[in-house]
Image (cartoon, helix red, strand yellow):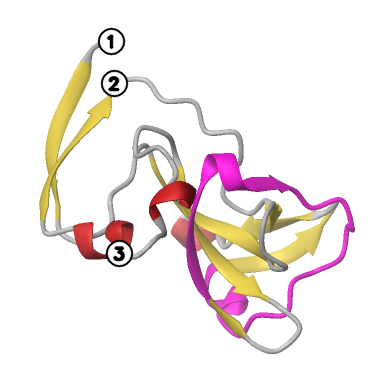
């Protein structure tokens, strides 16, 4: 598999990623975590794990996802609060509720919710 290497500032290190990676979800999709009770809206996608080593090692060893898969940045919510989550593709499933997510950051990135997904603000798309 052909790979590229680049410096990723958020991780503070070089990241190796496949030149072609298949993300199952797109920006604006509403997803649900397979193990924990929360859902969220995808607002960014990393082709492979690109967070800090400390963050990765904080996950219990038996539950750590493979690094070599897409990871999603989510505007997330549960019954108690809203927050930003970083989740591996293997731990996400489509959210079939068809309902909007309640997160204060949504209006900064998305202009509307229609047909079960969020539509990125025109000023942010290219």
Q: Is residue 85 above or below residue 45?
A: below
Calculate the distance from the C-alpha at mark 1 to the C-alpha at mark 3: 27 Å
Tell me the quarter of the image containing the N terminus: top left
Q: Residue at x 65, y 80 (%)?
A: 103
Q: Which residues are magenta?
A: 84-109
Closer to the N terminus: mark 2 or mark 3? 2
Mark 2, Cα crowd under 10 Å, few <14 / some 14-19 / many 20+, is few
Could you tell me which secondary element the residue under label 2 belongs to?
loop
Closer to the N terminus: mark 1 or mark 3? 1
In terms of depth relative to the viewer, which is nearer, 95 or 113? Answer: 95
Q: Residue at x 50, y 67 (%)?
A: 85
Looking at the image, residue 9 sits to the left or right of residue 25; the answer is: left
In the rendered image, which quarter is residue 60 located in?
Answer: bottom left
Marks 2 and 1 close (CB-CB < 8 Å): yes
* Residue 1: assigned label: 1
Could you tell me which secondary element the residue under label 1 belongs to?
loop
* Residue 4 percent coordinates (x, y): 17, 25
Calculate the distance from the C-alpha at mark 2 to the C-alpha at mark 1: 8 Å
In terms of depth relative to the viewer, which is nearer, 55 or 60? Answer: 60
Mark 1, Cα crowd under 10 Å, few <14 / some 14-19 / many 20+, is few
Q: Is residue 53 above or below residue 68?
A: below
Q: Which residue is mark 2?
A: 19
Q: Which residue is mark 3?
A: 55
């Amino acid at each position: 598999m052909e790979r590229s290497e680049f410096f990723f500032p958020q991780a503070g290190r070089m990241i190796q990623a496949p030149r072609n990676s298949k993300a199952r979800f797109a920006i604006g999709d509403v997803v649900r975590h397979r193990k924990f009770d929360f859902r969220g809206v995808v607002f960014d996608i990393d082709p492979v794990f690109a967070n800090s080593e400390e963050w990765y090692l904080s996950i219990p060893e038996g539950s750590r996802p493979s690094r070599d898969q897409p990871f999603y940045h989510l505007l997330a919510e549960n019954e108690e609060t809203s927050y930003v989550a970083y989740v591996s593709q293997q731990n996400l499933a489509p959210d079939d509720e068809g309902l909007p997510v309640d997160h204060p950051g949504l209006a900064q990135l998305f202009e509307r919710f229609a047909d079960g997904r969020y539509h990125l603000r025109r000023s942010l798309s290219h």
